[in-house]
Image (cartoon, helix red, strand yellow):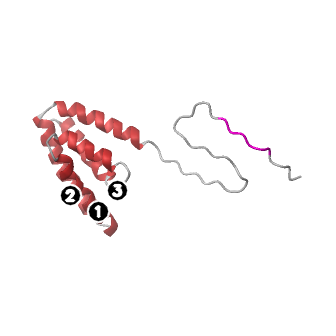
Amino acid sequence: MDEELVTLASLAATTVVKAAAGDLWGRAKELAGRVLRRPGAEGEIEPIRAELVAAGESGDKEVGLRVAQELTERFQQALLADRAVVEVLLRELAALRETAGTTVTMTVNGDPATVVQANQLTGLVINHAPRPSTG
């Protein structure tokens, strides 16, 4: 088997496993469904999330490793069966990475302030009264 396909399948499986605990699960499940390309594939992936979440709560790291290996094997089979799936998988992984973005945590203490956190702003105007001098 091509080393690139093994790496790609492993990356996809790891992405699905990591997404199980977060907000990207829906996208990861769609990715798995598109790669496996058969009716009901997304439904087959859903129980994996419950298993991974339960394992995370109990601290069982072996479950994540086992599930990632099982998914890697399933994805490898899909990639070998249809090379067109490679392009689908590459697009889906890129979209998932773009969706994941970056997490920024800010804490504002002290003076009242206006804080804006956004991906893209156009024409933002913030009006506020000047602060009284404390001198």
In the rendered view of the protein, which quadrant contains the N terminus?
A: top left
Q: In this view, does 113 lie above or below 8?
A: below
Evaluate whether residue 1 shows in this view. no
Q: In which quarter of the image is residue 34?
A: top left
Residue 128 magenta: yes
Mark 3 secondary-structure assignment? loop
**Sequence-first tag of 3 and 2:** 3
Q: Is residue 56 above or below residue 103?
A: below
Q: Position of residue 69 (x, y in %)?
A: 19, 52
Residue 73 magenta: no
- Work out which residue is located at the far left of the displayed protein and give it: 81
Residue 61 is labelled as 1
Evaluate whether residue 84 shows in this view. yes
The residue labelled by disc 3 is 21
Q: Please give the name of the residue rendered at 69% of the width and 49% of the height, measured from the top-left corner.
A: 113
Callout 3 amino acid: Ala
Callout 2 amino acid: Arg
Q: How far apart are marks 2 and 1 (CA)?
A: 9 Å
Please report the bounds of the magenta region as a residue range: 125-130
Mark 2 secondary-structure assignment? helix
Q: In this view, does 90 lie above or below 54?
A: above
In the image: residue 126, left or right of residue 93: right
Q: Where is residue 106 in the image (x, y as percent from the top left)?
A: 58, 51
Q: Distance between the residues labelled 3 and 2?
A: 16 Å
Q: Distance between the residues labelled 3 and 1?
A: 13 Å
